[in-house]
Image: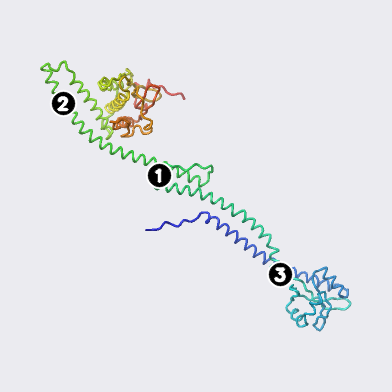
Amino acid sequence: MLGSPRRESLTARLVLPVVGLVLAGVLLNVAFSAWLATRRAAAAAREQQARVATALASTRVALSPAVLDALFALTGSHFVVWDTAGRQAGLSSLPADHLADTGNATWAAAVEAGQITFGGVRYRLGRAQATGVRPETVLVLTPEKPVLAAALETVWPVLAVAAATLGLLVPLSLWMTRSLATRITAVERHVERIAAGDFGQQLPAGSGADEVARLAAGVNRMSATLQELRTSLVAGERQRLLGQLAAGFAHELRNAITGARLAIDVHARRCSGTGAGRADDSLAIAARQLAIVEEEVRGLLALGRPTEAARGPVAVDDLLAAVRDLTAPRCEHAGVRLECELPTGITLEGRPESLRAALVNLALNGIEAAGRGGLVRLTGTAAHGQAALAVEDSGPGPAASIHDVLGDPFVTTKPEGIGLGLAIAKAVAEEHGGALSWERGPRHTRFAIVLPAETLAASSQQHLIQPPT
């Protein structure tokens, strides 16, 4: 099994290169400054010796210990008189112990090398010719600063600025990268949750508008889109399975209903000849009940597969009257008062069987919800750019727990319900380009199949009341 990939810190990858570049720049600057300081110190020593040699060559004053000491005080360089035999003549501004410890051979070697050391101090050694009363050769000893001291004197400002810069840069970089890493880590974890199938959560919207904020917003949109796609996929798969189940069940049930109705018709014809069934309307009631079941089967067929019936004009008055006649026996048995507001004068373009089946399902739901002593009302209206076929009942309305999923298949709170009535009504409404809506008023619950104005026949356009612009 492959191991998990090694995680690298974003803070380290951002801060360490920056700090490394700053340190490299500081070291290069220090090295260059030290080299430049050394060259400048050597050049300054040579220039000072040249000025001293020029001064000695132009002066007419005889050299004496007092004069040499005065020159030392003015120039900072020591002077040693060098005789014509190549020896130190004893006249010097150096301390006596330095002269006592240095022989002529050492002086000769120093003259050749151009440098000599006294008391831990290194001197650059040059020669000058004094043109005084007694022309003499003078050795000029110009002290050289140590390379390290000269370099440190030059580079310490650079080091101080670099230290202050790093002291501010490192904490600031750490804070900024940690903040950035925290935001990126939140996006990373959210993406991992999305990859695991959890689309419900959303990253909090940040106040910035940088790349990470836009990335988080994009991930949020992706999560919401995936959630919608999954919901749609699950609903589509459920709808497909439901359609297959409903189509098979409805086909078998419709065959059984057709056989039952034929048997009732045959029995009614036989009884009509003998007069035994003239005063008994039980066969008519049974036929009506079978008609209701047949409408429900039509609804299942509409839910299971798109109907092939062509659209045509549908008189809403006839449609509501048919629903009223089909559901009146059920209302009478349940003790529910049924009202149907006619006439409406509205004509639709649609499939009458599908619309009738959908309204029958809504009416049967309303009868169960209203209960004994309740009221169910059938209405049809055309207003505000749309038509509505509605069923109102005096029941308490759907439970709050299923408000968000009303119309989904198998969603119900009835002990013996299967949750297909509203699913059928919703499918029929969407088939006609509309939607199923519902609302809970102070004394009634209203479910409506809301259809667009395009479904209204030209003669019904006068019923529309356009909203104010």
Give the secondary structure at mark 3. Answer: loop
Q: Hey, what amino acid is under mark 1?
A: Asp
Labels 3 & 1 near each other (Cβ < 8 A) = no
Give the secondary structure at mark 1. Answer: loop
Separation of residues labelled 3 and 2 (CA atoms):
125 Å
Q: Is residue 70 left or right of residue 169?
A: right
Separation of residues labelled 3 and 1 (CA atoms):
71 Å
User: Which color scheme does this rendered protein use?
Assistant: rainbow
> For the residue carrying disc 3, how many other residues have a C-alpha within 10 Å: few (<14), some (14-19), or many (20+)?
few
Picture coordinates of residue 111, whole percent (x, y): 76, 79
Q: Using the image as rendered, state which of residue 445 and residue 252 is in the foreground.
A: 445
Circle 2 residue: 262
Of badges 2 and 1, nearer the viewer stands 1
Separation of residues labelled 2 and 1 (CA atoms):
55 Å
Circle 1 residue: 198
Quadrant, the N terminus: bottom left
Q: Using the image as rendered, state which of residue 44 and residue 405 is in the foreground.
A: 405
Give the secondary structure at mark 2. Answer: helix
Q: For the point 82% across and 70% down, which residue is it?
A: 72
Residue 265 falls in which quadrant of the image? top left
> For the residue carrying disc 2, how many other residues have a C-alpha within 10 Å: few (<14), some (14-19), or many (20+)?
few
Picture coordinates of residue 222, whole percent (x, y): 43, 43
Circle 3 residue: 146
Residue 230 falls in which quadrant of the image? top left
- Among the two numbered marks 3 and 2 on one chain, the one whose residue lies closer to the N terminus: 3
